Image (spheres, coloured by chain):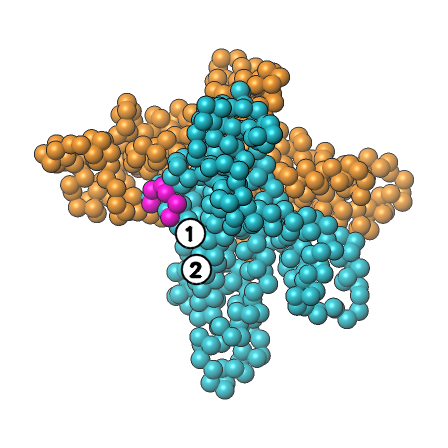
Amino acid sequence: MTRYLIRRAIGAVIVMWAVATLVFFMLRIVPGDPIGAMLFDAGDAAAVEALRHKLGLDAPIYVQYVKWFWLVFQGDLGNSIYGSNMPVSKAIIEALPRTLSLAGLGFIIALVIAVPAGLIAATRRNTMLDNVVSFWAFLGLSMPEFWFGILLIIVFAAGLKWLPAIGYVPLSDGFWPWVSHLILPAIAVGTTFSAIIARNIRSGMLEVLKTDYIRVARAKGLTTSAVILRHAFPNALIPVITVAGIAFALLMANAVVVENVFSIKGLGRLLINSILNRDYPTVQGAVLVVSAIFVLSNLVVDVLYTMIDPRIRYDK
Amino acid sequence: MTEQALIDTFEAPPRRQRGWAKLRGVLLSDRKALFGLVILSLFTIAAIFGPWIAPYDPNAMSFDMMLSPSWSHPLGTDDLGRDLLSRIIVGTQVSMFVGVATVAIALVVGVTLGVLAGYFGGWLDHIIMRYIDLQWAFPNIIIAVYLVAVFGTGLLNLIIAISLAFFDDFARIARGMVLSIKEEQYIAAARTVGVSHLRIMWRHILPNAMAPIIVQATVSVSYAILAEASLSFLGLGVEATTPTWGLILAEARSFITRAWGLGIFPGIAIMLTVLSINFIGDALRDFLDVRETKESA
């Protein structure tokens, strides 16, 4: 286990290095110059040269690369070259909790919907309820999450006026303001995930309910709820765990898009805005942090597998 | 596993009479697949004949702004008085084109790399798979966003970004198939009689590896359409003058409180297209007997 962990951790570090390097070089190889963007493509040659020198862009590319890497190691991602010239790391630290709360709440809401839905569909197989769950799961997989967000705004914010439509309030301003701003985007973020989970729980349950040990449990007179919840459900969770690997990735990816619907200034919005503004230091920083989150979550999920299902062993 | 699938496994000689007639039978007998075919045909007609079907010029502005659905404007008008139905019909073209074109490119690139990696193995396999593994660690849409960050926006860049984001799925599947087919005796036999590597890959391996690739391609079209819509919605997609579903939704975002139709109908178009393709993909998966490998992207 320890050997496996160490191997995976080294792998994660290599992936991060590869991503950082790819991003660094690709942003510099392709046409389009941040200097031009900064001076609105109108600066004279001397001004361009001065700025280029100031930003260290006149140095050979490998010097820039080493320099950049050295700074990244110290947590310095450079300064934004757009608007406020704020340090990129500061912008990311501000944005991060918003995205994480959104993804986290999306995860919880998705599970709260999907687990009972999947259980009901499996135990009431081929009934009206089962069909409703299946249909909804299909819709969940086919809807663009940002459009679902728009629908939620139309119904619950504009129509019923129950919840605010846009913005974010930090948790320190109180629980209800925080959660009320996050409910709608979190539902939008979680739909795809909950659809997949509901389908997997249903098919997992149907497999497990056919096994002998469930028949034994029934035969010895256990109540249906005990059979379902204590005996069948834990084992039906294994196929769910296998999709959990993509779950976090899915939630994060959805959050990146949905933030833009609800004007939440999270990592996704930071990334998209910096791309639109050709703010390369911020693009680099945001890509690096978003990637780090994915790599880290992949690692955590793989380790969780071994802890949850004793049948999975990685070390030989 | 469905009941039907269970029955099928117990049925003695496996029915393997493939072909178009059989495929047509499967698609027409499956209610969901039939629904998918009908809807998809409608959208395909809209994509091809869009400009002639659309009741108005999709870019013609008027003073009838944000009208509710009515007889003259079945889906209402947007903030600039443009007819929403016409914009959605014309938008079909770009969305479908991007969906099909990106998957075609991703398929060719991915399958080529996957077959080469699987067939030759060694350092070639190593290099290709290291990169594929790297990309595999991230959701396709995030890869596409990264690539747009590098290449810039616009229709062509969008197509490049989405197809590069999707090719790893094809490479993985193709490589996996090649690895198992390569061990078959007829491949060894072909080698012995002196058939060239290229011909073995093209004539003997590829046709037998196509089933899962076809299923993946079908499903990928729906994900590519979703990706295009998301990127266009974010402003990272096509030019602002091109009506596409994602872009119409992006423009509508500020006005949905006053004209809800603007926020609803383009999304329904996206959803119906994606749903139809997924239904057809599921039927194909059953028909070609392909195991489900990875859900969503």
- Residue B205, position as x, y percentages in the image: 53, 72
The reply to whether dot 1 and dot 2 touch (C-beta < 8 Å) is yes
Q: Chain of mark 1?
A: B
Question: Callout 1 environment at 10 Å: few (<14), some (14 to 19), or many (20+)?
Answer: many
Which secondary structure lies at badge 1? helix
Q: Nearer the viewer, residue A85 or B225?
A: B225
Q: Chain of mark 2?
A: B
In this view, A159 is above or below A215:
above
Residue B140 magenta: no
In this view, B79 is above or below A207:
above
To the question of a shared chain for discs 1 and 2, the answer is yes
Can residue B246 be seen at all in this image of the molecule? no
- Residue B297, position as x, y percentages in the image: 53, 45
Which residue is labeled 2 in the image?
B109
Which secondary structure lies at badge 2? helix
Quadrant, the C terminus of chain A: bottom right
What range is drawn magenta here?
Answer: B151-156
Q: Which chain is orange?
A: A
